[in-house]
Amino acid sequence: MIRRFAHRVLASARADNPAVVSGFTMGLLFTLAGFYTFITILLPTPTGFQPGLVSLIAVAALGWGLVAMVLPWARIPGLLRLAVAPAAMALIALHNMAAGQDAFRYGMFFFLVFIWLGLCEPRGTSLRMSPFLLAAYLGPLWADGRSAADLASISYALPIYLTVGEVLAWRTQLMQRLQGRLRRLADHDPLTGLPNRAVFTAALREHCAKPESVAVLFLDLDGFKQINDRLGHAAGDDVLVQVGATLRAHTRPGYADLPCRLAGDEFVLLLSDTDLAAARSLAEQLEQRLGELRAADGTPVRGSVGVAGGVSMDAQQLLATADEAMYAAKQAKPVGRRAA
């Protein structure tokens, strides 16, 4: 049982789903807060400190934290996850009353709440939690009859907590955008915007592992080198962009078709749940659409398309068969139209 729990904790820690990341982070901070609360019992305590109640609060925080780290947050509504923040502040207020109204002891727990919100939730979330913070911070002080000076401490505590949450959320958002750009650069061809060879290879292996028909159209442009040599690389790049857009438009609604650029003037189109007859029909349509494209000087863009497909085939062999079919189609054309 312990091994299974540890496995689930590690799985949550490695997840990249935002809801799971947020829930796991919240659970981890709850767990750390529970441990710290136990430690405070062993330290010198102020007047009014109730070790029994503080221990119960520590157990509650620790227990919830361990549970939260393994909950399926991806399937839990976001509002329920955010509802933990007011609940956590209520627990902090209860701890404040049980721990002798020592602001230093309970103030750091508010920081943990806003660190979680800042790291894992959208900008503005911390601001929306400010009414709960006011109630949780001022409630115990007011109930204990503290002085106006003590109550006025909210005037600097509130801005500090909210600033921590919102600044962290702002920086986290910037980092997420940067990670998204880097991920796209790693997975996509920068010129055409199509997924690259790595994405295609992974998708092909996934489809080939399923008991369903899968087909690959392998496209190589005819005469592309001559276009590059005669008109320059900028014109060649324009042709590649046109071909990429044509492949993207050639995908079928409702199917998991995947157009990719492998390298140079080589493109592929992965067709899910498609038999060879349908794939060959799509290949003919693709060649016709390519013939409608033009280079900068009006030269028609042409290509040779190879088709291969089957059920539960080896992914590498399927791609190689499509490649061979493409070269066979290129060789079958008149010499003047099959230049590399």
Image (cartoon, helix red, strand yellow):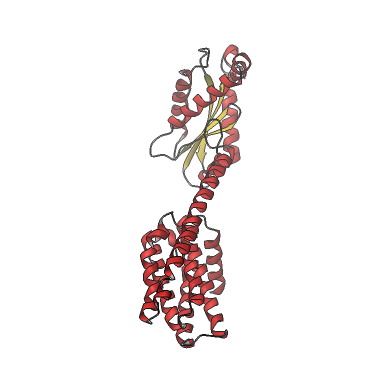
Q: In this view, does 69 lie to the left or right of 323?
A: left
How far across and how far down the image is residue 329, in percent? 56, 22
In the rendered image, the vertical position of residue 299 relative to residue 156, given as above or below: above
Q: Which residue is drawn at 60% across and 34% down?
A: 320
How far across and how far down the image is residue 296, in percent? 52, 15
Q: Tell which of 210 and 32 is nearer to you.
A: 32
In the rendered image, the vertical position of residue 336 relative to residue 32, given as above or below: above
Q: Is residue 264 left or right of residue 207?
A: right
How far across and how far down the image is residue 289, in percent? 45, 22
Q: Residue at x 48, y 46 (%)?
A: 211
Q: Is residue 10 visible?
A: yes
Q: Quadrant of the C terminus?
A: top right
In the rendered image, the vertical position of residue 168 relative to residue 92, given as above or below: above
How far across and how far down the image is residue 79, in percent? 36, 61
Q: Tell which of 249 and 188 is nearer to you.
A: 188
Q: In this view, does 129 lie to the left or right of 320?
A: left
Choose top left, top right, bottom left or bottom right for residue 150: bottom left
Q: Which residue is drawn at 44% across and 24% down?
A: 285
Q: Residue at x 45, y 85 (%)?
A: 53
